[in-house]
């Protein structure tokens, strides 16, 4: 009896939280939430911070404006170990909500070089909450590193 009461209490707390977050979203959250994340995740701590993706390259990112609901441009600078900005990699971005994996993932989309030799891509945030963008760095058809941009849309 005691265990039943505990279980009911947990459900009472957990269910509103789940439905609140998923309320305006397509897809079945519970069924699709089976994504496993890499154990040593390369999270870039903040905008404009340099982050090494391997022994040879480091990267930084910035947004055109502080993201809210809507479309914002993510720009990624890539530098070699001589601190020279480079543009010979292929960089892709996959934007998604970690708590709703599979609901509105963009998939790996190729970023385009802008005039400042930054890899750029528009990212559409259609709902409030936690978001993550996985960047993948490729050279000569081989992935040489990845990194994650995390943010909370409020
Ligand atoms: Cu969502």
Image (tube, rainbow, N blue to C red):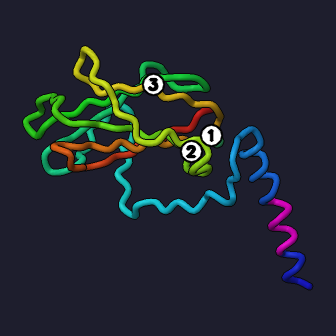
16 shown above or below 137: below
Residues in magenta? 7-13
**Residue at horizontal 88%, vertical 79%?**
4
Q: Are marks 3 and 2 in contact (CB under 8 Å)?
A: no
Quadrant of the rendered image holding ligand 1: top right
Left or right: residue 75 compared with residue 19: left
Spot the residue most to the left.
82
Residue that mark 3 sits on: 122
Q: Are marks 2 and 1 in contact (CB under 8 Å)?
A: yes
For marks 3 and 1 on the same chain, the one whose residue lies earlier in the sequence? 3
Image quadrant for the N terminus? bottom right
115 or 49: nearer the eye?
115
For marks 2 and 1 on the same chain, the one whose residue lies earlier in the sequence? 2
119 is within the stretch colored magenta = no
Residue that mark 1 sits on: 129
Query: Which element type, helix, strand or loop, lies under badge 3?
Result: strand
Spot the residue most to the front.
141
Type of secondary structure dominating the magenta stretch: helix
């Amino acid at each position: 009896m005691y265990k039943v009461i505990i279980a009911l209490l947990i459900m009472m707390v957990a269910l509103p939280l789940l439905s609140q977050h998923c309320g305006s979203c397509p897809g079945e959250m519970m069924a699709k939430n089976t994504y496993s994340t890499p154990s040593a995740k390369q999270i870039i701590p903040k905008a404009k911070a340099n982050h090494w993706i391997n022994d040879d390259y480091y990267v930084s990112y910035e947004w055109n404006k502080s993201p809210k609901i809507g479309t914002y441009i993510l720009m990624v600078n890539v530098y070699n170990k001589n601190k020279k900005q480079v543009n010979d990699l292929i960089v892709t971005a996959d934007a998604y909500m970690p708590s709703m994996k599979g609901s509105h993932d963009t998939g790996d989309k190729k970023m385009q070089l802008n005039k400042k030799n930054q890899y750029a891509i528009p990212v559409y945030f259609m709902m409030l909450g936690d978001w993550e963008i996985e960047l993948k760095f490729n050279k000569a058809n081989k992935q040489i590193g990845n990194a994650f941009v995390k943010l909370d849309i409020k």
